[in-house]
Image: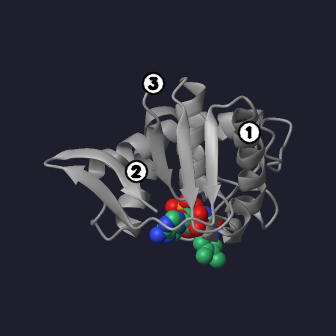
């Protein structure tokens, strides 16, 4: 029997994890205390940062700005991966139907606080809600295909551990 992944939380992080796992053929259970539409993710306004062009110099600048905004506390490798992967993730979100503001050349960019150049892709002033709606729709299709099982209104309590091995969790 194929094991199921358990994902706790169904905001943008949880939905994205469930979508990626199901796309790769891993069935998963998505547990959340509240429905996705009530997560903090729907409040995100300004946009999502990612260099769309400009090569290595632009990526280096995005990395530097992000490290500075994190007061040097961020994991440099995690930030490097984020900066390198951002453009592809934004393209993936567009493919799922997120209505980002567009120009003839590609996504419109705005410059948010802490950034030295415009690199923020946005959907009006409700970017989080727009992305969440697109991702939740995609996960709903995977749910219909039997790849995702949703457990809304369930609160995570604790992991079931056997020595160092995780066997599941109590909700
Ligand atoms: C006003 C505002 C504006 C923002 N603007 C931006 C922006 O412009 N750009 C940007 O990048 N970021 C922005 N952010 C930050 C961004 O919204 C968050 O970083 C992001 O949405 C976090 O996503 P998440 O999935 O980790 O968390 P959440 O969306 O908070 O989801 C958490 C999930 O976990 C579930 N959960 C919690 N506890 C339990 C439990 N014990 N058991 C089961 N489930 C549980 C919740 O029900 C929910 O489903 C903004 C945030 C706010 C508040």
Dividing the image into 4 quarters, which one contains the N terminus?
top left
Question: Residue 77: x, y in percent?
Answer: 29, 45
Query: Callout 1: helix, strand or loop?
Result: helix
| Residue receiving disc 1 | 138
Q: Is residue 97 left or right of residue 36?
A: right
* Residue neighbourhood size for the residue with mark 2, other residues' Cα within 10 Å, grouped as few (<14), some (14–19), many (≥20): many
The residue that appears at 46% across and 46% down in the rendered structure is 6
Give me the C-alpha separation between circle 2 and circle 1.
30 Å
Q: Nearer the viewer, residue 134 or 123?
A: 134
Mark seen at residue 2: 3
Question: Residue 152: x, y in percent?
Answer: 64, 60
Query: Callout 3: helix, strand or loop?
Result: loop
* Residue neighbourhood size for the residue with mark 1, other residues' Cα within 10 Å, grouped as few (<14), some (14–19), many (≥20): some
Question: Residue 12: x, y in percent?
Answer: 60, 55
Q: Earlier in the sequence, mark 2 or mark 1?
A: 2
| Residue receiving disc 2 | 63
Q: Nearer the viewer, residue 71 or 19?
A: 19
The answer to the question of whether label 2 and label 1 lie on touching residues, with beta carbons closer than 8 A, is no
């Amino acid at each position: 029997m194929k094991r199921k992944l358990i994902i706790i939380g169904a905001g943008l992080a949880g939905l994205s994890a469930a979508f990626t796992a199901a796309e790769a053929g891993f069935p998963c259970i998505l547990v959340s205390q509240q429905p996705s539409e009530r997560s903090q993710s729907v409040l995100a306004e300004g946009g999502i940062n990612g260099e769309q062009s400009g090569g290595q110099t632009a990526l280096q600048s995005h990395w530097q700005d992000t490290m500075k905004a994190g007061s040097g506390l961020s994991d440099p490798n995690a930030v490097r991966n984020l900066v390198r992967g951002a453009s592809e993730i934004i393209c993936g979100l567009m493919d799922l139907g997120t209505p980002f503001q567009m120009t003839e050349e590609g996504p419109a960019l705005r410059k948010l606080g802490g950034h030295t150049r415009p690199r923020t892709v946005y959907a009006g002033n409700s970017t989080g809600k727009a992305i969440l709606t697109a991702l939740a729709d995609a996960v709903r299709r995977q749910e219909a295909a039997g790849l995702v099982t949703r457990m809304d209104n369930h609160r995570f309590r604790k992991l079931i551990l056997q020595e160092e091995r995780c066997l599941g969790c109590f909700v």
